[in-house]
Amino acid sequence: MTGQLAFVESPVQLLNVLEWAHTRSPGGCAAPPTGGPADAASPLTVVVLSPTDPMSRGQLRRMAQLARDEGLAVHWQEARGGRGALVRTLRRLAGPLRSAERVIIGDPFSRYVQLLLTLFAPRHLTVVDDGTATMEFAARLGSGERLVRWHRAGGLGPRELVLAPVTALARRRLAPAGSRTVEVFTSLPVEAPEGVAVTGNGYAWTRSRFGPPLLTGGADLVGTSLVETGVVDADHYVRVVGGLARAHGATRYFAHRREGAGKLHRIAVETGLQVVRPELPLELVARRGPVGRTIVSFPSTVVHTLPLALAGTGVRVAVCEVAPAWLRATASPRAQGFLSGVTGTAAREVDRLEYG
């Protein structure tokens, strides 16, 4: 495993690695790219640092097969598979990391990725989207702040204190320095720090491989993990979902892969919505169809990605603002501003909704 090496931990990361490879080699992901300082290297190899939750693993298995169908080499690594998994993973990846000309990562906030970055200094680095974390990463890299997710409240806990040296070194290696280049491949509006190149992700691979979808007459709702991350009150969230369903004639609720089974059961019972656990990232599910003529989402990456993936199909995307009253008392002080920023920077084609 040499040349170009990608580390992915979620289905969306793997989708965006495929999109990145497509922009470098539109004729096929596995063909040698031609657009950057490391792009004469051998074809791209993807290493899946497998998560533990079943939904993510299932989607990743299916995405891995799509990547193999595109000609990419995909290695499944049980990086969290019990005692000794970390040591085995580091031992297996040490050689490829040292020889990799370009490294692609999806989540710069991942402790696993940060640990890998302390073992080597990549010659060239690409960060692909893994949700709205890309916006936060660009902002924190530019300001020199710690790489801590926006929804984390409070100061440094015991675990963060132990890992602080790792995070600090990883942040330095995620920044351009000397001959090292850093690229952010994104569908989101980011302000690049000095020396960081931004490449737009227009979901060209997705549109070339799937669809256009058959449109149904109703609306679909897109779920969020804001309850699971401790940002939004669960009772309020379920009430709002029911109200949105009635207002827009929605019949389906596409669950986020991190949403809990108890909450989803409650949504199905109290709102009458059909809860759907997508087998692939929503961009692919929507593009393949069938899909509602209107898609209503809370502030998340999909308000930026779906208009690109569904361009020219006639699907309307709307984003529902998260009101301050929805937030839990323990939510991070930065939560409201960050969520408003996600909504405010959505594409012009996205309608903005308010719901009390």
Image (cartoon, grey):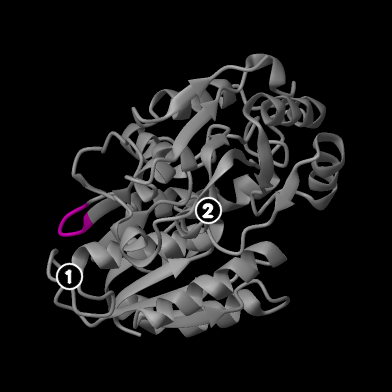
**Type of amino acid under label 2:** Leu
Answer with the quarter of the image where residue 151 lies.
top right
State whether the magenta stretch is mostly helix, strand or loop: loop
Residue at position x 30%, y 58% in the image: 126
**Type of amino acid under label 1:** Ala
What range of the chain is rendered magenta? 177-181
Helix, strand, or loop for circle 2?
A: helix
Residue at position x 33%, y 48% in the image: 186
Q: Is 113 placed left or right of 254 in the picture? A: left
First reached walking from the N terminus: tag 1 or tag 2: 1
Label 2 CA crowd tier, 10 Å (few <14, some 14–19, many 20+) = many
Provide the residue designation for mark 1: 38
Residue at position x 38%, y 46% in the image: 313
Q: Is residue 62 above or below residue 219?
A: below
Provide the residue designation for mark 2: 282
Q: Position of residue 216 (x, y in %)?
A: 55, 46
